[in-house]
Image: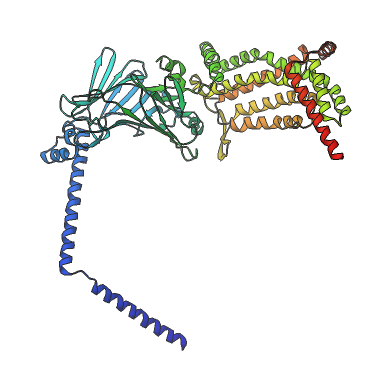
Amino acid sequence: MEEKKFDVKSIIGFILIFGILIYIMYQNQPSPEELEAQKIAEQEQVEAEKKESRQKETLVTTSADFTSGSKALDSTQLAAAQSKVGALSYALTLPGEATTTVETDVFELKFNRIGGHLSQVKLKNFVDYDSVPVYLVKDNNSAFNITFSTSDSRTHNTQDFPFQPTVSKSGENTIVSMKLKVSETEFLEYRYELKPNDYMIDFSIKSQGLSGLFNTSQPIELDWKQKGIRHAKSISYENRYTRLTYMHDDGKIDKLSQGGDDDEIAEDVEWLSYRQFFFSSILVSNDSPFKNVALTSTNLVEDDEIDTLYTKIYESKLPLAYSGGELNKSLGLYYGPTKAETLKAYDKGLEESIPFGWGIFGWINKIVFIPLFGFLIQYLPHGIAIIVMTILVKIMMSFVQYKQFLSQAKMKILKPELDAVKEKYKDNKMKAQQETMAIQSKAGASPLSGCLPGLMQIPVFYALFQFFPTAFDLRQKSFLWADDLSSYDSVLDLPFHIPLYGDHVALFPILAAIAIFFYMKMTTGQQMASQPTQEGMPDMAKMMKYMIYFSPIMMLVFFNNYASGLSLYYFISNLISIGIMLVIKNYIIDEDKVLAKIEVSKTKPKKQNKFQKKMAEMMEQAEAQKQAQQKGKKK
């Protein structure tokens, strides 16, 4: 019964609320006058939208018509265009083809009439990892336009206007002129001069008769944007060597981030390179440098399983300067291989866009390895050239290995004596260290004497680490089972992706890892046997033991996606190191003779240098201080 009462009350409540809402709506309904005004406003809004739509349609039709060159503007279209763009409406009255195609020995180029820029750059002499022609510009991956203001307070962008193309010859050179015309004698011109067998395009931006049109009090800016198209088998590896580099302030080289997003403001920029691993798009200022250039690099490879088409987006905003109210900027556009000899020929430092390595590492590559490898590949297949260069490098560095093994032999001979000192002064650690240093000094043996020769190999090691991934000559050159020495040598494709490792198995890294394991097993075994453990110092023997296994695993995992030429070098290098080590150990270093020399050295008075004296004094002071503290605690 209570449930029925609740239902009746609920129904009555809903009826009352509904009645109140109806009453409120009735009281607030618009009057006839308000309804009429609302109707008029709606009609005006519709008319305004229709007018705006007609204007947009007119301009869109204009652009479409003149891209195809089909017809001229009628009076209505011309009036709408003049209202929208002012003096630049003349450009819309000129018919023309959508694109202009020009070929040279190295290029197939397409120039877009809308915007006047290059809409396609095909390099005729190269193909990518999948045998598809290499395109640096294609499918709207690039934008090249100028934003400027006019004296009638309008702001325009060249990407919105049709240019008039003409193609002519100047001797062997081909001239492509793209003009944005205000009249037949007044225009903004992009002039491209193409030379036979040359990847550098002489490019200029000039205006004629536009000093009255430009609003020179407002900045004018060139905006160059480009998205890097994938060309290599591993997009993540390619992306690692894809980077925006620029020269500024009389020869300084700087780069944006290699792995993430980055932006920067640069002064006095002489050139800037959109490097795409083995290919580059470079803009060069042939006259005065660009001021206050805004540079941006955006990484597009977050997941190499998904992001498979593009590597990075580069954008540069470059201010242009007026001269007498006109534009006259001389530039160069390079589209071609990131090859040291090719870039160096232009004598503008463009080869510095290649990551040879910083400081001494870069110098070693430029002075030694690049010329040496370039000489070898003139007479040998590229894989054999790598092996021969590896042999030459190892022979050159063999004296370093000799010094290391000699030091290890001395430390091995001294180990029983050093262990006896350690036992004798086990309650006086400082005294034990002093005696140990004294014995090593008299014998001419020191742990550092084995480390220093090893440190000498680091510049060579790192220089070659930089050389192989950037050596253009290795690109698509085969050796044994590797079909491209600049990419990984896959012998097995996996049906799944392993983090850090990849979706394939490369064989050269496996061979290099095995060689490194045996080499380290042989060398660190001797080091652990000869190396005394000192109080307060890390347990080197334990660290070396871990490194025997850690280094090969690092090689196996991280080099699986690296250039197979680099893994081939490490494989051959470690094989040769094992051979040299066996020769030195078994045929050159005689431990009996080394022991005899040590005994003779011990008998000679050993004069301490200033550093040794200072160290001895510091150790004595530390020991005295320690003993004083211990006495104080006993009291």
Q: Nearer the viewer, residue 558 or 349?
A: 349
Quadrant of image for the C terminus: top right
Residue 578 in the image: x percent, y percent? 70, 19
The quarter of the picture where residue 416 lies is: top right
Q: Nearer the viewer, residue 81 or 199?
A: 81
Residue 343 showing in the rendered view: yes
User: Is residue 489 positioned above or below 169 on the image?
Assistant: below
- At a point 25% along the width and 16% down the height, the residue shown is 169
User: Is residue 327 positioned above or below 87 on the image?
Assistant: above
Q: Is residue 528 left or right of residue 68?
A: right
User: Is residue 297 positioned above or below 379 on the image?
Assistant: below
Q: Is residue 355 left or right of residue 250?
A: right
Count numbered badges in the picture.
0
Q: Nearer the viewer, residue 323 or 516?
A: 323
Residue 238 in the image: x percent, y percent? 49, 30
Residue 125 showing in the rendered view: no
Residue 153 in the image: x percent, y percent? 21, 37
Q: Nearer the viewer, residue 154 or 332?
A: 154
In the picture as drawn, the residue positioned furthest to the bottom comes out as 1
